[in-house]
Image: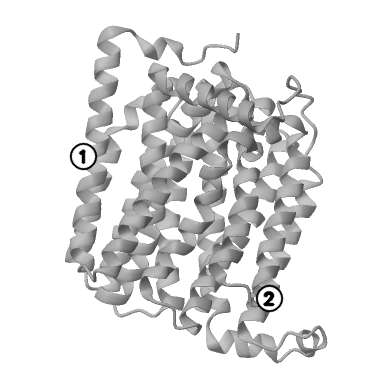
Amino acid sequence: MNRGFYTIMAAQFFSSLADNALLIAAIALLTVMESPEWMTPLLKLFFVLSYVLLAAFVGAFADALPKGRVMFITNLIKIAGCRMMFFHVHPLLAYAVVGFGAAAYSPAKYGILTELLPAEKLVAANGWIEGLTVSSIILGTVMGGALVNPKVAAYLLSFDGFHMIGIDTPAEAALCIISLAYVLAALFNLKIPDTGARYAHQERNPIKLIVDFAGCFKTLWKDRLGQISLAVTTLFWGAGATLQFIVLKWAESSLGMPLDKAAILQGIVAVGVALGAVAAARFVPLKKSLTVMPLGVIMGFVVLAMTMVDSIWYAYPLLVIIGALSGYFVVPMNALLQHRGHVLMSAGHSIAVQNFNENLSVLTMLMIYALMVKIDLNINIVIGMFGLFVSGIMYLIMRRHAANQRQHDSLSLIGEAKH
C-alpha cells in the first residue's frame, strides 16, 4: 500500500473515533435529561437518516471534487454537529447533523480506494480499513465511556484551561475532547493525495440526480454479483447497528453493568470484528469472497448463546466470537461490492447506492428495536428473534446465489476490468 492509503486510514480512524465517542456522550446526555429508554436507539436512527435521504446527491458530490477535499468539507460538518451539543441543542438533532456529514463523507472514503488501488488489493485494503475502523470503534466507545465517568469528568474539570474557555460541566468537557479528534481527522484529510481521477461533469438538477441514482440502484441490484454482495452488506450493517444497542441493554439487564462499563462490551465485539477483518484480508482473495457466506448463518446462531450468559467471563469470549465471524464474512463481501460498483458505474455513485440500502436497513431494524423496547419486551426474546432473523436471511441469500450460479457462472465476473 502507498502513503496515500495510510493517510486515508489515519483520517478515517480519528473521524470514526469521534463518531463513536460522541454516541456514548449523547446517550449520557439523554440519561441526564431523563429521556425515555426508547429514545436511545433513535440516536443512531437520526444519524443514519441522512444516508438514506441524501443518497441520490452525495455520490455526485463525491465525484465532483477530489476525494480528500470532500472528506475535509464533510468532516467540518461533523464538527459543527458536535459543537451544537455545547449550545444545548437536543442530542438527537445534533447527532443528526453529524450523520449528515458522515453520509457525505462515506462515498469519498470508500470511493477513493477504487481510484487508488487495483482490484486485487481491494480485499486487503478493506480488511485494513475495517480493522482500523473497528479499532476506532473500540477506542471510541471506551473513550466515550471514560469521558462520561464521573471521576474522569471531575478530573478534566480540575484543569484551569477548561474554565478559561467557559467549560464547566462534565458534558462540555467530554465534547471538547471529542472535538479534538475531529480536528485531527480534518488535518489528515488535508494531506490525502489527489488520485487524478476525474469524472464527467456531475448533474446538479435534483430531479435528474434522483433519476440517475435510481438507474444506478437498479443496475447494482440486477447484477448477479452485485445483488448478492449488496444483500449481505445491507443485512450486516442493519444487524450491526441494532446489536450495538442490544449489547448495552443486555449488559444492563443480564450483567448488571452501568453505561460506562457496558460501553466496553461494544469494544469487545469490535475487537472480534477487527480480528475477523484482518484474517479475511490475509486469507480470502477477491475470487473466493462468496465462500464466506455460511459464516453469516453461523453468526446468527452464535448470537442466541447470549441468552444463556449471565457472567462477564463468558460474555467476553462470546462477543469476540460474534465479532470475528461478522468481520471475516463482511470484509470480502464489501470488497466484492466495491469492485462490481466500480466496474458498473463510478466509485462515488456505487458507494451512495450501497449506503442507501445499508442505512435503510439500519433505520428499519432500529425502529423495530425501539418499538420492542417501548413495549418492554424481554431482552432475551429480542436477542432470540434477532439471531434467528440474521441466520434466516443469510440462508435465503445463499439460496439466491446458488440459483444465479445455475443460470450463469457469475463468479467469472470477479476481477473484470471497467469497460
Mark on residue 74? Answer: none
The residue lying at 50 percent from left, 84 percent from top is 32
Residue 407 visible in rendering: yes
Q: How crowded is mark 2: few (under 14 residues within 10 Å), some or many (20 or more)?
A: some
Residue 182 vs 348, above or below: the answer is below
Q: Which amino acid does label 2 sit on?
A: Phe
Which part of the image, by quadrant, shows the N terminus?
top right
Q: Mark 2 points at which residue?
A: 86
The residue lying at 53 percent from left, 78 percent from top is 29
Its colouring scheme is one colour
- The answer to which of 46 and 302 lies nearer the viewer is 46
In the rendered structure, the answer to whether residue 163 lies left or right of residue 275 reads: right
The residue lying at 54 percent from left, 36 percent from top is 126
Residue 143 visible in rendering: no
Which part of the image, by quadrant, shows the C terminus?
top right
Q: How crowded is mark 1: few (under 14 residues within 10 Å), some or many (20 or more)?
A: some
Mark on residue 392? Answer: 1
Mark found first going from the N terminus, 2 or 1: 2
- The answer to which of 18 and 312 lies nearer the viewer is 18
Residue 262 vs 14, above or below: the answer is below
Q: x%, y% of residue 31?
A: 46, 80
Q: x%, y% of residue 157?
A: 69, 89
Q: x%, y% of residue 95?
A: 58, 63
Q: What residue type is labelled 1?
A: Gly
- SS of the residue under disc 1: helix
In the rendered structure, the answer to whether residue 202 lies left or right of residue 111 reads: right
C-alpha gap between disc 2 and disc 1: 44 Å
* Quadrant in the rendering for residue 288: top left
* Quadrant in the rendering for residue 229: top left
Q: x%, y% of residue 222?
A: 41, 18
Q: What is the count of numbered marks?
A: 2
In the rendered structure, the answer to whether residue 199 lies left or right of residue 288 reads: right
